[in-house]
Image: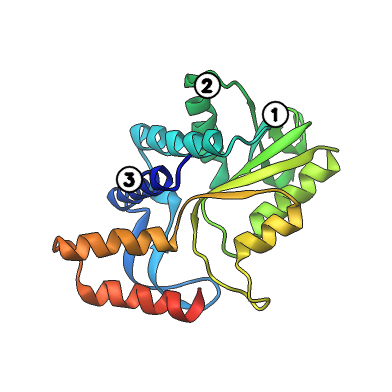
Amino acid sequence: MPREANRLQASKFIEFLVEQKVLQFGEFTLKSGRVSPYFFNVGSVNLGSAYAQLGEAYAGAILAADIQFDVLFGPAYKGIPIAVATSIALAHRGVLVGVAYNRKEAKDHGEGGVLVGAEVSGRVLLIDDVLTSGKAIREAVGLIAQQGASIAGAVIALDRQERDESGDTAVANLAVEIAAPVISIANLADVIQYLDSQVQGGEYSAKIFAKVQNYRSEFC
């Protein structure tokens, strides 16, 4: 897909995220203790119609990246509904794949175990919301490896593009670690481009725009 088409898709996706209050601007303390001028929480999606749009965005990114895979895997908990929505969107496009996910704690009755859904085998594509520490995805990678399956890649909604101690981003480090592509539908640069257009239209203040730009300069 041409870069222009990717950027157009990202712009529309960010508009959707803002409408659903998944992406908000203000002052937020992250788990790391860092204060961020924006916050991303896909848990804010709560309507079937919104999940349908979310699934379409992920499906579009997957097909555009031409990743070959057999199973979608959604790490608990936020990755689970995203993986389901994505599988439905893919089915509408004629791509039928199984969906699997993990429990936070192993079930000790009934079928038992940690994994639920389709058999985790072949090439597994991870689906999650945003990559910060990458803990949920790394736990999922370990579970997938235990099943003898391979990692086809990972798809996330937003790449915050923040550097860690190594000087690289979490996305870049994860891609090296799993030896597979990590695809993001949008990134911080796209967020800033969106904000710029909204500031010019009077939807957001120049102060918010400046804070996000400064945050990128310092941490990204």
C-alpha span from label 3 to label 1: 28 Å
Looking at the rendered structure, the kind of residue marked 2 is Ala
Give coordinates of residue 181: x percent, y percent: 65, 49
Residue at 62%, 74% in the rendered image: 164
The residue carrying mark 3 is 12
**Horizontal arrangement in the rendering, residue 106 relative to residue 31 (left or right):** right
Query: CB atoms at circles 3 and 2 under 8 Å apart?
Result: no
Marks 3 and 2 sit apart, C-alpha to C-alpha, by 22 Å
Q: Secondary structure at mark 2?
A: helix
Q: Nearer the viewer, residue 58 or 63?
A: 63
Between 140 and 163, which is closer to the camera in this rendering?
Answer: 163
Q: Earlier in the sequence, mark 1 or mark 2?
A: 1
Q: Secondary structure at mark 1?
A: loop
- Picture quadrant of residue 87: top right
Q: Looking at numbered disc 1 in the image, what kind of residue is underneath it?
A: Asp
Q: Which residue is mark 2?
A: 91
How many numbered marks appear?
Answer: 3
**Residue 183 horizontal/vertical position (percent):** 57, 48
Residue 76 can be seen, yes or no: no
Q: Which residue corresponds to the image point at 57% horizontal and 58% vertical from the top-left?
A: 131
